Amino acid sequence: MSLSRRDSPHANAAIVVALRPEDYGAASLGPLAGIDFQRRIERAAFTAGGGGFQAPAQRLADFLANRSSSSLRATSYHPGVVARALDEIFPAFVTRSLREGLEGITRRLRGFLHEDAVLVAAETRTSAPLRIVRDSLTLQSPSLPGLYPAGEGAGYAGGIVSAAIDGVRVAQAILARET
């Protein structure tokens, strides 16, 4: 976790679960089903945190053992955390995926399963929950020539590196158009 001086005692990482449209009912809710799914999780996290912007959290060891945490270590989340089982916040298929992934990491990475490790919920926005349409060859919007939807906000990336790569692709498309 890095503040301006990069001297925080905390290390932060995100654990991401892949979702498919059928996971959140896209067929019945239409193109904004992903946003509705995010809102449901955010509402559950807000409620589980007590409604005062404290975040629900659980010790990693307790989450993996499927038990409640009786206490929590300090985290980098400044409004504070409240001990809650993450199963109260996420759908069962999400917690199952989280457990499977975290168990795999703990087998491969010695020291990852540390007694002080705390999971804080919920980060629901790794990338845009929708994608702005663009032509696969020119990378321009088909309905608004000259507009190049790109990066996370347009739904073409899921992080800093992939956004940078997409930006390079769009820049190359623009240069190719100009020459």
Image: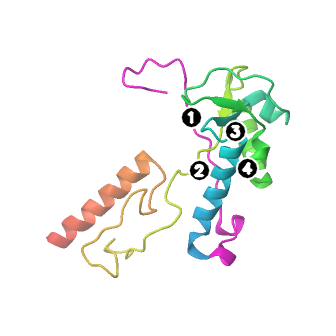
Magenta stretch containing residue 89, yes or no?
A: no
Within the image, what quadrant is residue 31 found in? bottom right
Q: What whole-number distance in Å separates the C-alpha atoms at marks 1 and 3?
A: 24 Å
Please tell me the numbered disc located at residue 158.
none
Instruction: Give whichever of 143, 53 is nearer the camera.
Output: 53
Mark 1 element type = loop
The mark closer to the camera, 3 or 4, is 3
Instruction: Give whichever of 13, 58 is nearer the camera.
Output: 58
| Number of numbered callouts drawn | 4
Please give the residue where the numbered disc 1 appears in the rendered image.
13
Q: Are marks 2 and 3 in contact (CB under 8 Å)?
A: no
Q: What whole-number distance in Å separates the C-alpha atoms at marks 3 and 4?
A: 16 Å
Please give the residue where the numbered disc 2 appears in the rendered image.
124
Which is nearer the N-term, disc 3 or disc 4?
A: 3
What kind of secondary structure does the magenta stretch mostly adopt? loop
Left or right: 70 as drawn, with respect to 32: right
Q: What whole-number distance in Å separates the C-alpha atoms at marks 4 and 1?
A: 18 Å
Residue segment shown in magenta: 1-29
User: Looking at numbered disc 1 in the image, what kind of residue is underneath it?
Assistant: Ala
Which is nearer the N-term, disc 2 or disc 3?
A: 3
Extreme residue toward the left, this view: 179
Please give the residue where the numbered disc 3 appears in the rendered image.
50
Residue at screen point 72% across, 25% down: 113
The mark closer to the camera, 4 or 1, is 4
Q: Is residue 87 above or below residue 166?
A: above
User: Looking at numbered disc 3 in the image, what kind of residue is underneath it?
Assistant: Gly
Quadrant of the rendering where the C terminus is positioned: bottom left
